[in-house]
Amino acid sequence: MGLNLGLGLGHRGRENPFTLADDFIEPYRYLVEHHVAVMDKDVLDRPLQTEGKRELLGFIHKTVPMRDGEYRLNGAIEATIDSYCRILDKHAGNLNLPAF
């Protein structure tokens, strides 16, 4: 099955050809916001160097609690997309979202 990334569920916009992708990413936005909120403020107050970039992107290595276990960010997003496809395919099941 192929998904049309321009046919979003919640996001809309003619200028954005990836509204469905935005919908899949939205439940994970909290992870980034929380990571930045607890980051060392000194890193955020100066021009971003290699160390700061590394710390800023550190959220991609954290685990995300899901209904069926814990995943790294990439795996969690894939689990959400897989569950969405199963719903479309079999007309059953629940959307697998982060359990924050």
Image: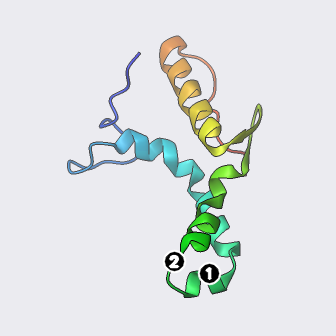
Report how many numbered discs are placed on residues in the image: 2
| Residue at position x 34%, y 35% in the image | 5
Q: Where is residue 58 in the image (x, y as percent from the top left)?
A: 65, 60
Q: Helix or strand or loop: what does disc 1 sit on?
A: helix
Where residue 69 appears, x then y in whole percent? 79, 34
Among all residues in the image, which is located at the extreme front? 50
- Quadrant showing the N terminus: top left
Amino acid at pointer 2: Leu
**Relative to the observer, which residue lies in front, 52 or 36?**
52
Query: Residue 43 bears which disc, if any?
Result: 1
Q: On screen, 25 above or below 37?
A: above
Side of 26 relative to 22 (left or right): right
Query: Pointer 2: what residue?
Result: 48
Q: For this rendering, which residue is in front, 43 or 10? A: 43
Q: Residue furthest right?
A: 69
Residue 85: which numbered mark, if any?
none
How packed mark 2 is, by other alpha carbons closer than 10 Å (few <14, some 14-19, many 20 or more), is few
Q: Residue 12, image x and y in percent? A: 31, 48
Of the two numbered discs 1 and 2 on the same chain, state the one appearing first in sequence: 1
Q: What residue type is labelled 1?
A: Val
